[in-house]
Image (cartoon, rainbow, N blue to C red):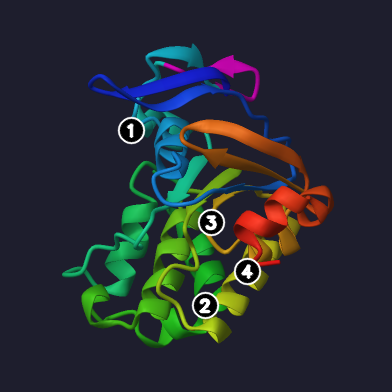
């Protein structure tokens, strides 16, 4: 993202935001409520268009690409609050993740892979998504995103509403996905947990980037410690 400004009517949500995510990294975006984190994510996936500035992906200017075109080129999202399809079964939700694909044999291979990664989904493949627990729905949202075969995975507040033990499992899974070759961008309020697995991070405040650096440098930053780490 280069000098991106996003407005909702006359109100600026992002102001001159620039950030870079390099291939193979985990990068986290931190900040309080109404800081602009979710707007940044929406700008990356194309559901919000910048008033100025540009968004680039793998060397191409994708600022004016719609979301479906971005997904077709390897960008996927695990949205805030999961946003699974509650009346569809687990299997039907997963197949929605592969909606843009037509390589049936490879889809079947990937379906088996995500079922192996999340055995609970395999057990409950015929169960409606809306009847599952929050942790199970989060698994389903992640698995659904993986069915599009992303190279770049965006995750919006993956720890929201989960018990501490499930949060740890969630971040372990994020690391495993990254080790498999997927570049990951995490928007998260749990700063300590996000920085524990990230290579680098950015901090937003009132729509502006106020801190940026390696995860280690942010953990040691006094401003970061006071505002987000409770130190």
Q: Are marks 4 and 2 in contact (CB under 8 Å)?
A: no
Point out residue 76 in the picture as x, y percentages from the top left corner: 47, 45
Q: Is residue 57 magenta?
A: yes
The correct choice, above or below, for 107 with respect to 70 in the image is below
Lower sequence index among marks 1 and 4: 1
Lower sequence index among marks 2 and 1: 1
Residue beneath label 1, please?
47
Residue beneath label 4, please?
171
Other residues around mark 2 within 10 Å, as few (<14) / some (14–19) / many (≥20): some
Q: Are marks 2 and 1 in contact (CB under 8 Å)?
A: no
Residue at position x 63%, y 35% from top?
210
Lower sequence index among marks 3 and 1: 1
Point out residue 109 in the picture as x, y percentages from the top left corner: 53, 62
Point out residue 41 in the picture as x, y percentages from the top left corner: 45, 40
Residue beneath label 3, please?
188
Element at label 3:
loop
Position of the N terminus, as image quadrant, is top right
Lower sequence index among marks 3 and 2: 2
Q: Quadrant of residue 19?
A: top right
Point out residue 136 in the picture as x, y percentages from the top left corner: 40, 79
**Residue sitting at the far top:** 52
Residue at position x 38%, y 54% from top?
97
Lower sequence index among marks 4 and 2: 2
Q: Nearer the viewer, mark 2 or mark 1?
A: 1
Q: Quadrant of residue 201?
A: top right
- The alpha-carbon separation of the residues under discs 3 and 2 comes to 22 Å
Residue at position x 71%, y 38% from top?
212
Other residues around mark 1 within 10 Å, as few (<14) / some (14–19) / many (≥20): few
Instruction: Decide if residue 230 is in sight here.
Output: yes
**Which stretch did the figure color magenta?**
56-63
Residue beneath label 2, please?
118
């Amino acid at each position: 993202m280069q000098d991106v400004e996003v407005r909702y009517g006359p109100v600026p949500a992002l102001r001159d935001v620039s950030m870079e995510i390099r291939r193979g990294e985990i990068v986290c975006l931190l900040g309080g409520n109404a800081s602009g984190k979710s707007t940044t994510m929406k700008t990356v996936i194309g559901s919000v268009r910048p008033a100025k500035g540009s968004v680039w992906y793998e060397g191409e200017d994708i600022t004016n690409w719609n979301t479906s075109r971005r997904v077709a080129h390897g960008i996927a999202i695990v949205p805030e609050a999961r946003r699974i399809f509650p009346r569809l079964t687990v299997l039907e939700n997963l197949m929605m993740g592969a909606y843009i694909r037509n390589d049936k044999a490879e889809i079947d291979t990937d379906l088996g892979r995500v079922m192996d990664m999340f055995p609970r989904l395999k057990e409950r493949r015929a169960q409606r998504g809306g009847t599952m627990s929050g942790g199970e729905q989060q698994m389903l949202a992640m698995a659904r995103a993986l069915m599009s075969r992303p190279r770049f995975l965006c995750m919006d507040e993956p720890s929201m509403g989960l018990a501490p033990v499930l949060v740890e499992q969630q971040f372990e899974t994020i690391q495993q996905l990254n080790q498999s070759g997927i570049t990951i961008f995490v928007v998260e309020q749990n700063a300590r947990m996000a920085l524990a697995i990230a290579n680098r991070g950015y901090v937003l405040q009132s729509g502006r980037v106020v801190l940026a650096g390696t995860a280690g440098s942010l953990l040691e930053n006094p401003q970061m410690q006071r505002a987000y780490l409770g130190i």
